Image: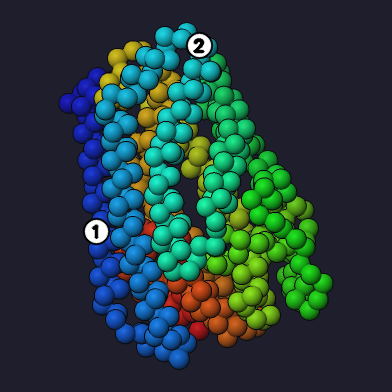
Amino acid sequence: MNTQTNPSFFLILFLSFFFIELLLNFFLDFLNQKSILAHPSLPSFFKDKMSIDVYKKTQEYTSTKLSFNKWNLLFSSFITLIVLFSGLLPWFEDLLTSFHLNPILHGSLFLVTLLLFVSLLNIPLGVYNTFVIEGRFGFNKMTFKLYIQDTLKSALLGFLIGVPFLAVFLWFLNFTGNNWWGWAFLFMTSFQLLMLVLYPTFIAPLFNKFKPLDEGVLKEELLTLAKKTDFTTSGLFVMDGSKRSSHSNAYFTGFGKMRRIVLFDTLIEQMSLDELKSILCHEIGHYKRGHIYKMLFFSLAFQGVGLFILSLAIKWQPLYTAFGFEKNPESLKHVGLFLFMTTFSTFTFFLGPLMNYRSRKHEFEADAFAIENTESPKHMETALLKLAEKNLSNLTPHPWYSAFHYSHPSIYERIKAFK
């Protein structure tokens, strides 16, 4: 088979990977559900650490989410196949061509409309997950009014930021020659670094309130810990996470001197002072061990490779012919971009375990840093157990499911590692 001229080669390759990924995900869900059923009683490791009632609830929550994810996977796969094989794409491209728009406006309308179309189709599943599943287990605190407000804000931000970004990207694609991908890489890298600075100060406050941590023992202890670990921060902030969910978390955001430590209000309510110090020290550990820069470098390297592959794929006629386009690829670069974005993840899903392995390794290292600097493995352990309990984390995930889907080790693995 001549892969240079026969679109059947790419079509067969794509569909093979597509259905292999789909079947593998169903198989992993099956293994994870089987692992839950194989542990009806509280594992010995968690005895005296968690009640059987909480453990049963974690199992029920995990099973419910697995069932939902199966339907979500089926629906998203169905939408992908409809978009690619129904003739929608050639029809829409011909419609836009009839208006004789300039390439940037033409390409932007093509991509924005299709991305908006897919996003709208996914709204019902998002509503069901938030108000039915999360609500059933007591996590959702969001009103429907707030959900609508968040959706509209996200859409407006996506338009104000995403459309200009897309237009600039298309300009590079159409007007900077064969080396466009290098210029696009520099542009995307600059944009991402800019967003690291702008997000915590200007974007995140559009959705949540961030107030400085009140003066007191907690603030003094956390600032002392930051000073001890030589972690420079622009401040400690409390986020009103309880406005939307009872899930809890802590993180630091920003770049350089703009770094700020953020604690969910739910986390402060759930944890003791020593447990909060352990959690914060874990987050600082990610920075001190260079994880942030390593992950950023890895992400940018992957992005650069992806853009280079895109620069080759976008000139490959079979990519277009396979999905009903017969025109010269030179006039269909925006179409090639959409097809690449839609199909590329299908060919790279097997890289998931490698990426997760690296992320889990970082979690172990951050735990070790926290214990080293707080000298309190006991408080780290109780903090992790509380996080598992309050978030109903799966305590007995199947190793294969964990490898593909979990960027963090299980609670059992983390506690076992530092004990």
Circle 1/circle 2 CB separation < 8 Å = no
Choose between 345 and 305: the one closer to the eye. Answer: 345
Give x and y (percent) for residue 102. 52, 12
How far is mark 1 from mark 2, CA to CA? 47 Å
Q: Nearer the viewer, residue 252 or 164?
A: 164
Q: At 32% from the left edge and 85% from the top edge, which residue is drawn?
A: 41
Above/below status of 378 relative to 143: below
Q: What residue type is labelled 1?
A: Phe
Q: In this view, does 339 lie to the left or right of 201?
A: left
**Residue for badge 1:** 27
Secondary structure of residue under mark 2: loop
Of the numbered discs in the image, which one, if any, rests on residue 51? none
Res. 26 in view? yes
Where's the N terminus, which quadrant? top left
Sequence-earlier tag: 1 or 2: 1
Q: Residue at x 53, y 18 (%)?
A: 105
Residue closest to the eye, 410 or 365: 410
x then y, percent, for residue 220: 80, 75
Camera sees residue 377: no
Residue behind mark 2 = 101
Left or right: 164, with 132 as reference point: right
